[in-house]
Amino acid sequence: MSFDLVFFGGTGDLTWRKLMPALFQAFRHGKLPADGRILAVAREEQDDQRYRQWLGERLQRVEDAKRPSEQEFAQFAELVHYRRMDLSRPDDYSGLKAWLDERSADTAVLYLATSPHLFPQICEQLGAVGLNRPNVRVVLEKPLGHDLASAQRINRIVGSVFGEEQALRIDHYLGKPAVQNLMALRFGNALFEPLWRRDSIANIQITLAESIGVGSRGDFYDGTGALRDMIQNHALQLLTMVAMEPPSSHDADAIRDEKLKVLRSLKPFDEQSVLRDVVRGQYRKGMAEDGVVIGYLDEERVPPNSHCETFVALRTEVQNWRWAGVPFYLRTGKRLAERDAQIVVNFRPTPHSIFPGASQPNKLVIKLQPEDGLELHLLAAKGNVQGESLVPVSLDLDFDKAFAENRVGAYERLLLEAIAGRLNLFVRSDEQEQAWRWVEPILQTWQRSDGAAGGPRPYAAGTWGPAAASALVARDGFSWAEEQ
């Protein structure tokens, strides 16, 4: 299959840090369709050779296992081209169309790795020159908007140019192998389905923790915050994968229909429940692996007295027959104790224990990063002269070891899916808007409270966030995974 893949924002951080390395891995693994061209477009004045040199220097900064040799990069670079474009000039879009029309590729994928406020303008210009024909797909990076109204505006304009099946809204967490194995665990095996409900599960925790701060992205992050950056998209997408009903097929819309039902079933927030069930924090000076680190307000390009949250923990419920009464806890933050992304399914304790000593409930841990795998925590008998006692044991499936030769990174998988036109791992517009609809009362309540005694709670860098986050879970008689 022939393809053309165009990166708008071809000299930006996302392109060289994530997208180009992912494409190189697909090339190295022999998964990239043979007859392809990769085009980077940006405002800088340079040619193919200078861009290839620029890209090669940056690919030497990626981790060792993903770094190309000189020979590998020389072969990959033959696919890579560069074109200067001013995104505000209609003539430049005509030039892009002419470049794509030089051959009749089966598929053209236009990846918008730019600021989201440019999406409407780019899509309208693409439509004006006829680059919305059936074999063209456009990939939209997050965040799509900063609230429901702005997201609806972007979707409305994009939808006026491209059909829903042509507009691929990317969430790279959906490309992670462990998330795909969550689908396989639930719907490819009969073992867990009878237990995957309120009768057997006590609570579910989703943690997306980062140990780094905002670095030099202070101005961008301060206009976004942890709720918009992680909860509205990544965390809610993971929640839907955990809580969805079995789809009728593996068809993209069958899966996305069930995810949308979960989002519509989430318990809505009002001002009172936001104050009760949502904790926001902001990191202060503290300790990290490399020593003492500064607080958020001292970071580069962060406004003084900013109320931007770098941590969010919240409690919610899915109001349907399967999950009624089961708390779902979502948590994310910067400068936390460690880099960790996982879903923890805590099962209910046995109704009556015949063994001496405390009994620890079973739990299933779906690990997303830095490791990638599944852990099932059970209890086993340890005999002694006084009788049998139970000790925790775990069954650990390391996907990296089990499937080492076939491992595909998140962006690598998503780029290949976009080229192939498979929509399962992309977010539909009604899903995205429903997620905004659910978080918007939180944003509105915070906006009203910031002028009074409100604002984020401080927490020391290198910890697990404000103490109020632990109290939120303890109120139901539970604790976060690291406290168990």
Image: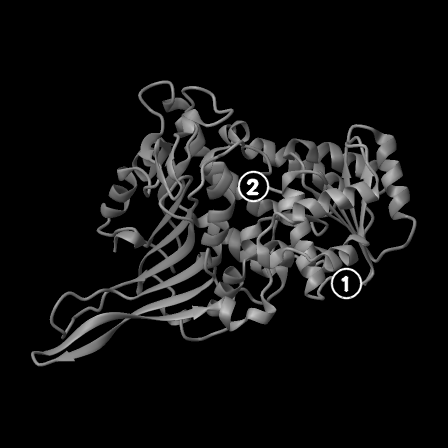
The quadrant of the picture occupied by the N terminus is bottom right
Q: Nearer the viewer, residue 130 or 291?
A: 291
Query: For numbered disc 2, what is the local secondary structure?
Result: helix
Give the amino acid type for the residue marked by disc 1 in the picture: Pro
Q: What is the residue that sits farthest to the left in this orientation?
A: 386
User: Residue 126, relative to residue 418: is it above or below?
Assistant: above
Foreground: disc 2 or disc 1: 1
Q: Residue at x 12, y 68 (%)?
A: 357
Residue 262 on image: x %, y %: 47, 52
Q: Is residue 414 above or below residue 230?
A: below
- Mark 2 Cα shell of 10 Å, populated few (<14), some (14-19), many (≥20): many
Q: Give the CA separation, mark 2 to mark 1.
A: 34 Å
In front of the other: 155 or 389 = 389
Say whether residue 341 is left or right of residue 454: right
Residue 86 position, x and y percent, is 79, 30
Residue 370 visible to an observer of this rendering: yes
Residue occupying the point 75% across, 37% down: 123
Task: Identify the disc placed on residue 343.
Answer: none
Residue beneath label 2, please?
433
Q: Position of residue 465 (x, y in %)?
A: 33, 40
Q: Is residue 18 left or right of residue 281?
A: right
**Mark positioned earlier in the residue sequence (2 or 1):** 1
Location of residue 442 with respect to 483 vertically, above or below: above
Answer left or right for 442 relative to 139.
Answer: left
Say which amino acid is labelled 2. Answer: Glu
- Look at the image and tell me in which quarter the C terminus lies: bottom left
- Judging by the rendered image, the residue that carries numbered circle 1 is 33
Disc 2 and disc 1 in contact, CB within 8 angstroms: no
Identify the secondary structure beneath mark 1: loop
Label 1 neighbour load within 10 Å: few <14, some 14-19, many 20+: some
Q: In x, y percent, where is residue 252?
A: 62, 59
